[in-house]
Image (tube, rainbow, N blue to C red):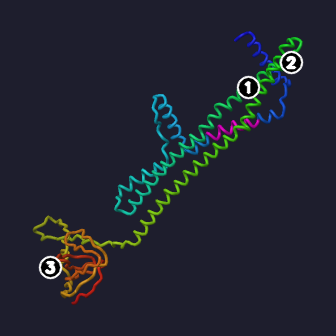
Amino acid sequence: MSVAGFKKQFYKASQMVSEKVGGAEGTKLDEEFKDLERKADVTSKAVVEVISKTSEYLQPNPASRAKLSMLNTMSKIRGQVKSPGYPQAEGLLGECMVKYGRDLGDETNFGGALVDAGETMKRLAEVKDSLDIDVKQNFIDPLQGLYDKDIREIQHHLKKLEGRRLDYDYKKKRQGKIPDEEVKQALEKFHESKEVAEISMYNLLETDQIEQVSQLSSLVESQLQYHRQAVQILDELSEKLKERINEAQNRPRREYIPKPKPVFDFPEPDQSNGGFTPSVAPPPSRNSDPYLQFGRASTRKPRPLSEQACCKALYDFEPENEGELGFHEGDIINLTNQIDENWYEGVLRGQSGFFPLNYVEVVVPLTH
């Protein structure tokens, strides 16, 4: 630092101490300038805070936001063009729904609905990613540019103005000891800095506000576009779920049919060591002994059936066990026997087997 520069720094420091400690008064700036300075300061704080809150709005998870910032920095260091994206909550929810929906299976109503909802959530995450990009490009980046260029320039001019004011006030109070030409020169520099700062603040508050409002409008347009797309996507999902509900309500409910219970055969004492062997009764068949249905002696004889006895299928019945007779809605089945209060035995297209009573409607009743 030169001798002149050192002296100037000494003058400013001395004047500042005089004002802060000794209560000396410095040169007053006019009210119009102070009003411009106050509005410029508020604008500066607003830009910084709005940028921060907008980032939180787009990426609300602070941990994920910090991790993403670190990854983006690492990507720039490594020269990678594509940076990792923010993990949208809709995408995470969608992946969870799809996973468990596929585990349940598309053939189940709930599983299929979970897959539909999960795919929709993933589409919403993609739309949210687009919102992030649009808002960053059209709102956050321009505001950041405004702060980095115009506002920092104003801050520089105001800081320079304050330094020249302190220099001028110090020299003015020591007029006589300091040459008049030096005092005059300090006053000119003070007015010069004041004019530059005033013009910068005026341009920010008056001229650039059109651009700032346009940027705010871009933010709103991006949000509108996002919500329009989100509504369209959710409407499609809502229609799919309503169709699933209607389909489930109109589908005949398949009632639970109890399976034959296991029975226990107790062998003769001389053939056993005291234990017993469980066995499951075989499914009833057309040729089975009517007195030994389900592996044990029946206390009542099955009712004999006439050849004309028949019934009409009310619903489709898919056989799940050996000996069951499958049929479709509307089939006419010849009845050959009633096994018990839950099961019929019959013949359809040359196939014999047993089936539940509540799946059919008797056309010609059985006769005793």
Q: Is-magenta flag for residue 317? A: no
Asked whether residue 16 is in view, the answer is: no
Q: Where is residue 43 in the image (x, y as percent from the top left)?
A: 70, 38
Question: Counting residues from the N terminus, which is met first, the one under dot 3 or under dot 1?
Answer: 1
Seen from this angle, which residue lies furthest left? Answer: 270
Element carrying mark 2 = helix
Q: Which residue is at the front of the view, 140 or 22?
A: 140
Query: In the image, which is nearer the foreground, mark 3 or mark 1?
Result: 1
Amino acid type at image mark 2: Lys
Instruction: Tell me what residue is drawn at x 46 percent, y 53 percent.
Output: 121
Give the residues in magenta: 38-51
Seen from this angle, which residue lies furthest right? Answer: 176
Residue 238 is left or right of residue 303, and the answer is right
Q: Is-magenta flag for residue 41? A: yes
Q: Name the residue under label 3.
A: 289
> Based on the displayed image, in which of its 4 quarters is residue 113 positioned?
bottom left
Q: Name the residue under label 2.
A: 172
Q: Position of residue 327 (x, y in %)?
A: 25, 74
**Alpha-carbon span between mark 1 and mark 2:** 20 Å
Instruction: Look at the image and tell me in which quarter the C terminus lies.
Output: bottom left
Instruction: Tell me what residue is drawn at x 19 percent, y 67 percent.
Output: 278
Query: In the image, which is nearer the foreground, mark 2 or mark 3?
Result: 2
**Alpha-carbon span between mark 2 and mark 3:** 128 Å
Amino acid type at image mark 3: Asp
Q: Mark 1 points at which residue?
A: 159
